[in-house]
Amino acid sequence: MDPVAPPEGAAPPAPGAPLPSPAAAPRVLGRVALALAVVALVAVAVAVVLLAVPVRVPAVQQCGTPAMYLLDGRVDVVPDPEGRILGPEDEVVTLEPQVAEAARRAPCQERVAARAAPAGLLLAGGFVLGLVAFALELFVVRPRARRAHPGTITPPAPPA
């Protein structure tokens, strides 16, 4: 069967009329797959930035990056009711009342959670979108493009 000939019973196209592009559907779906892949990459990049920017409780604790805080299982340094904490050299340090109150109100755990939760959602969403884009490209766009242009892909030569 000739791949260029119209199907049986179909009227031939009028002279001078533009022929429908058999590759139009793969192009549109290919652009959709590309857009999904780009959105997935942007979501993962934003999540990485959120997990990589260090968090700190001013004058109390350097929390580090949210990713390392979660992976290391670090413990919060929270001032006691008198505003005292152990300093870096294991000496007792007394904080100003407003600094101690701010550290009690938002310790590292809460500051890290404020960044890690959205980053986790972005990572999960980016992963799912990336898989959808990959599957769309692999199982829909490529087969349609191959069917639209059957002569462009030559089969391998038979073994001798």
Image (cartoon, rainbow, N blue to C red):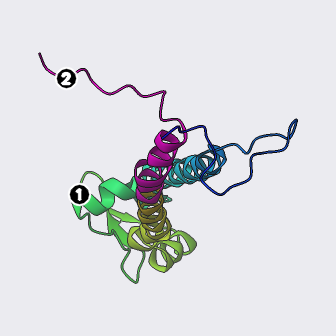
> On the rendered structure, is 85 left or right of 21?
left
Please state the horizontal and vertical placement of residue 140, each as a whole percent of the image: 47, 54
Report the residue at 60% width, 51% height from top.
7
Mark count? 2
Q: Which residues are magenta?
A: 131-160
Label 1: few (<14), some (14–19) or many (≥20) C-alpha neighbours in 10 Å? few
Q: Which residue is mark 1?
A: 90
Q: Is residue 134 magenta?
A: yes
Q: Amino acid at mark 2?
A: Pro
Considering only order in the chain, which callout, 2 or 1, is on the residue closer to the N terminus?
1
Q: Is residue 149 magenta?
A: yes
Q: Which residue is mark 2?
A: 158
Label 2: few (<14), some (14–19) or many (≥20) C-alpha neighbours in 10 Å? few
Q: Quadrant of the C terminus?
A: top left
Quadrant in the picture for residue 117 = bottom left
Q: Secondary structure at mark 2?
A: loop
Please state the horizontal and vertical placement of residue 45, each as a whole percent of the image: 50, 47
Magenta span dominant secondary structure: helix
Q: Nearer the viewer, residue 43 or 9?
A: 9
Q: Is residue 159 above or below residue 112?
A: above
